[in-house]
């Protein structure tokens, strides 16, 4: 993880809800995870300055954004002075401006000495050049979010806040945006605070996860470790859980109608995808569609049977959530009866069975 850049030590109360944080976030991508009503959006709004905490302090790098420690000299920087980029769930583009003007808006309102990101570079990274002359009303959901990202980044912020930016998008669009977010972070170094209620997004993009439940901070750790912490388990929903994987195309097999792709330590056979050898590819695998076997199965038509180790498994609702390490973490949701009959325990060696038809290729 990177060095700490954002210190959140504040309290915000409403008549039926109180958010209380004591967290130091590192300079990478931090996911804020939790169910609806847990305080995720309130956290972002306090960082952005659109909501004012009741007490405490908030520091971004070496600057104080908010403080009531000294009652004679309180600090509450206005939103426009915080150097924070904010991308909302629906993008909130200016409807009367073309894409190019939307992107240039933040850039033109940023002092010259603080401009370290150029619009042309952002257009390239986020692949929005074909959209520059279009109006927001003509864009798809995924296109709107890419433009909203470019606009927020064009102001050269010191942190980028993202409030469930994929919630209204279909699965292929979610995959595209996640990959581009990582590309933006890798090429610009801008820290991100990414709000989501989807565990798959958290594990796919974040280096650190802050987990909230009804305003309480219940965990702050690497996503793989957070997944198995006792206070977090009741917040997970196996029925809506999936694994997001990234790899490269190895080859096309026209005779079988399948695409062969290599991931971190294993190969998967996918429904035919129009990609060249060596191209990047991302897929999603629902946890409920992953079968677990104690030994490599015989006599199956499924080709995708990677071997894996089970570092941990947890009872989540009516299922047992198995986080299997096969080079990348693959989640499987099995019944308690299946877990017992397979004698699954931490350290177990297993085979995972993934049907090609259950693997969703992302855009």
Image: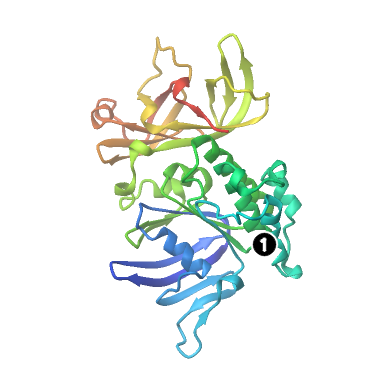
In which quadrant will I find the C terminus? top right
Q: Residue at x 55, y 43 (%)?
A: 141
Secondary structure, mark 1, is: helix
Residue 267, image x, y percentages: 55, 24
Place residue 55 in its image quadrant.
Answer: bottom left
**Does 282 sit above or below residue 164?**
above
The answer, for residue 189, to whether it is visible in the render is no
Q: Is residue 224 above or below residue 306?
A: below
Name which residue lies at 66% across and 45% down.
Answer: 126
Residue shown at 38% from the left, 53% from the top? 34
Q: Nearer the viewer, residue 23 or 190?
A: 190
The residue at the point 44 percent across, 63 percent down is 43
How many tags in the picture? 1
In the displayed structure image, the side of residue 265 where residue 293 appears, left or right: left
State left or right for residue 333 relative to residue 132: left
Q: Is residue 185 left or right of residue 270?
A: right
Question: Residue at label 1?
Answer: 106
Report whether residue 238 is seen. Answer: yes
Crowding at dot 1, Cα within 10 Å, few <14 / some 14-19 / many 20+, comes out as some
In this view, the residue in front, 36 or 294, is 36
């Amino acid at each position: 993880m990177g060095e700490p850049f954002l210190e959140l030590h504040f309290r915000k109360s409403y008549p039926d809800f109180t958010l209380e944080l004591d967290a130091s976030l590192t300079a990478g991508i931090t996911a804020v995870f939790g169910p609806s009503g847990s305080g995720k959006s309130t956290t972002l709004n306090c960082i952005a300055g659109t909501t004012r905490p009741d007490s405490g302090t908030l520091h971004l790098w070496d600057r104080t954004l908010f403080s009531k420690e000294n009652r004679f000299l309180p600090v509450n920087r206005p939103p426009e002075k915080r150097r924070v980029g904010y991308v909302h769930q629906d993008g909130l583009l200016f409807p009367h401006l073309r894409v190019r003007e939307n992107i240039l808006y933040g850039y033109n309102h940023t002092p010259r000495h603080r401009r370290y990101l150029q619009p042309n570079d952002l257009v390239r990274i986020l692949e929005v050049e074909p959209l520059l002359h279009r109006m927001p009303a003509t864009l798809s959901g995924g296109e709107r979010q890419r433009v909203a990202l470019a606009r927020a980044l064009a102001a050269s912020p010191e942190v980028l806040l993202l409030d469930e930016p994929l919630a209204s998008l279909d699965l292929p669009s979610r995959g595209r945006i996640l990959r581009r977010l990582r590309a933006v972070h890798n090429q610009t170094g801008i820290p991100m605070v990414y709000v989501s209620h989807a565990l798959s997004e958290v594990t796919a993009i974040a280096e650190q996860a802050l987990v909230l439940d009804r305003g309480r901070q219940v965990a702050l750790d690497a996503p793989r470790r957070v997944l198995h912490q006792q206070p977090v388990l009741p917040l997970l929903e196996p029925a809506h859980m999936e694994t997001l994987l990234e790899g490269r195309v190895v080859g096309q097999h026209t005779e079988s109608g399948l695409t062969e792709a290599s991931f971190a330590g294993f190969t998967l056979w996918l429904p035919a995808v129009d990609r060249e050898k060596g191209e990047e590819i991302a897929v999603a695998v629902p946890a409920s569609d992953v079968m677990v076997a104690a030994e490599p199965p015989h006599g199956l038509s499924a080709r995708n049977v990677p071997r894996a180790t089970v570092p941990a498994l947890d009872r989540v609702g009516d299922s047992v959530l198995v986080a299997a390490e096969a080079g990348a973490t693959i989640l499987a949701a099995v019944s308690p009866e299946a877990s017992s009959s397979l004698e699954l325990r931490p350290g177990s060696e297993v085979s995972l069975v993934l049907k090609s038809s259950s693997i969703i290729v992302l855009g």
